[in-house]
Image (tube, rainbow, N blue to C red):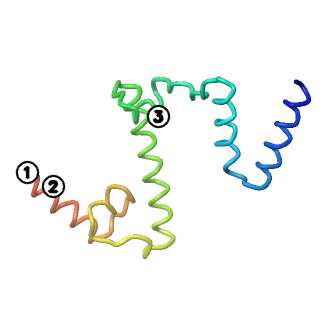
Amino acid sequence: MAASHTARQRALRELAARHGEEFELLLQVERLKLGLTPERPPRAEHGTRSKYQSGCHCADCRSAEAAYRKERTRLNAARLAADPTLKPHGRLSTYTQWGCRCVYCRRAMRDYQQAAA
């Protein structure tokens, strides 16, 4: 039986070499054939962006999401400063998500705030 198992492993490795990303799917199929359950990723812990995205909005998870968004906006602003043509200006999203503070984007934010008031 060990030889059969070794041969099957060798065949899987050969398939993986030929098909690359499909290897993980092949492994899952083989695990199911053997009666094994698919591996589940560990649950996200509180205070992480993953937990926030899965629906938790406790203070720790909100803080993690805020930190992510702040860093993302900072990185986007740096990219936009290097290449101002990267995103269209005069849009609320360019102001909020890309940190642009040009005249046009500030005007878009002002118009949005006035319409909401």
Looking at the rendered structure, the kind of residue marked 1 is: Ala
State the CA–CA distance, disc 3 to disc 1: 33 Å
Amino acid type, residue under disc 3 in the picture = Ser
Report the quarter where the N terminus lies.
top right
Q: What label sits on residue 117 in the rendered view?
A: 1
Instruction: Sort mark 3 into few (<14), some (14-19) or many (20+) by Cα contacts within 10 Å.
Output: some
Looking at the picture, tell me which residue is in the foreground, 23 or 72. 23
Instruction: Name the mark on residue 50.
Output: 3
| Mark 2, residue position | 113
Q: Earlier in the sequence, mark 2 or mark 3?
A: 3
Residue located at (36% from left, 27% from top): 56
Secondary structure beneath label 3: helix
Residue 61 in the image: x percent, y percent? 40, 29
- The answer to whether residue 95 is above or below residue 22 is below
Which residue is found at the position 11% from the left and 57% from the top? 114
**Where is residue 107 shown, x and y percent of the image?**
21, 67
